[in-house]
Each structure stands twice: as structure tokens, then as C-alpha cells.
Amino acid sequence: VMECGPLLSMTSSSSSSSNKVFTGGIDGSIRQFDIATSTPSLIGMHGANSSNDDNKKVACSALSAIHDSSSLIASAGWDSKFHLWDVRSSNKHQPVITLDLPGKAFGMDTSLDGTKVVVATSGRQNCFIDVRSSSLSVTNNNDKENSQQPPIANMILQRDSSLKYQTRCIKFFPSTQGIAIGSIEGRVAIEYLTELGISNNNKKKYAFKCHRVNDTIYPVNDIAFHPTHGTFATGGADGTVVTWDGN
């Protein structure tokens, strides 16, 4: 039993050998679930420092595993906080990094190279965070144990979404060249990251309508990219999954 109420977010480690799933609950908890033993354990909480009153806890609304790291999990919540957790840390239930966000978090993704996190918040803001996980281990002279340098995270860009309504999901391109944004108003926007010095190859941002049935408009709940072909799929509250050619 997870004991966290409804789950608002979920992710798994990018390591192929991992048998762990991580969940974000409406009670603000980030929990690790061991598939082999069916055992949950608490990693940390959002809003834990604001009050001891259970009624003041805030939801963990977004989770994402940092690629190329077997131990780092990023979370964001309705407390307008971004946390980075090291699940192997001996300092239990404490994030290794905390950053302030401009509003409640509604969606999050990490780049495939493990260096960037994007968080979509209230107020139509998209926040880009540079994460350096220091995944290169330092081995001692006896070659018996490895130690990791602490991770570093900094907000490097905050900008408005090109969509007029609340963001529901956000995803990096596999190349990290741009992002796809899905909104509650049945639209997807494709944007590029030239502000970060990443070339857009002379492509322009655009948006299109989707997940609409007659006059009924449904939110875009999720976006998933094919890792090599440039195609992507959107899942909507209309109960359909639609594939698109991103090129």
C-alpha cells in the first residue's frame, strides 16, 4: 500500500538494471517502489518544511529520472519548489538541491543527455534547469569504492509558453534541440531553444490543434517522442493516442 493518496506523477530509473519505480503523491511524498519485493519506501516530501499539519502538505505533481544517472530523481510540486534527490544519500528525506519555481509545477522532463530539466509551471512559465550530476565517479587508490561529487543545478532560462492556456505536459526532443508543449486547450506547440545557444537549423516554432471532437476540446495529457525517427505521439483526455511527424 503506497499510503500517499492518488498518484500524480511517476518515473523509473534510466538504468536498464534498475527494478525501481518512483511515484509522486497528492500528499507531497516522493516514494520508491521496489518491484522485486513489492516494497515502498519514502524518499522525501514537498512542503515538508512549511508546516507539520497534514492539511498543509502540497502535491508532488512532476517527477523525472535524470538520464545517465542511476540515483538522481528530480521532483517539482504545488509548493513551487524543484528538488533533486539522491536515492543513495545517507541524509534521508533531504533533497541535495532545492530551487524556487515561479509557480505550481504542472509538468517536467529531462533531456536524454542528462544535463537539462524543463519544468512547466502556472502562469504559462517554462523553466530550464542545468543539471550536472557529476556521474563520473572518483575511484580511490585501492579501487574498492567509488564516490560521487555532489550534483549542481542552476536555473538557466525562464520564458513564457507560446500557448495561451495552461500547460499540461512538456517534453524535450531526443536531440534536446527543442521542446513540445501540450495544453489543456487541445493544442501542441513546438519550440526551439536558441536562447541556450542550441541551433534550430532555421526551423520556426509552430502549434497545432488536436484531441478535439466536434465542439468539445480535450487536454493533451502526455507527449512521447520516438528516440530516432523524429515522430511523436500525443495522448489526450478524449481517450485517443495520435502519432505525428515532427519533421
Image (cartoon, grey):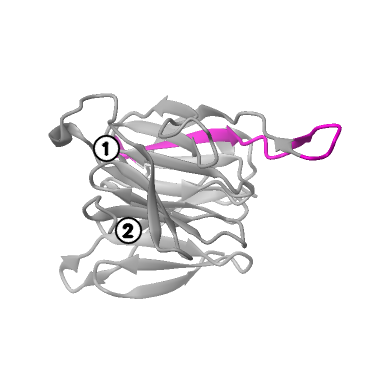
- Tell me what residue is drawn at x 56 percent, y 45 percent: 71
Residue tagged 1: 78
Dot 2 falls on a residue whose secondary structure is: strand
The image quadrant of residue 213 is bottom left
Under mark 1, the amino acid is: Trp
Residue tagged 2: 187
- Tell me what residue is drawn at x 46 percent, y 70 percent: 244
- In the rendering, at what x and y percent does residue 57 appear? 21, 35
Answer yes or no: is residue 99 visible.
yes
Q: Is residue 15 above or below residue 75?
A: below
Near-viewer residue (121 or 6): 6
In magenta, the rendered stretch is 121-144
- Tell me what residue is drawn at x 29 percent, y 24 percent: 49
Question: Which numbered dot is residue 203?
Answer: none
Q: Is residue 140 above or below residue 30?
A: above
Under mark 2, the amino acid is: Arg
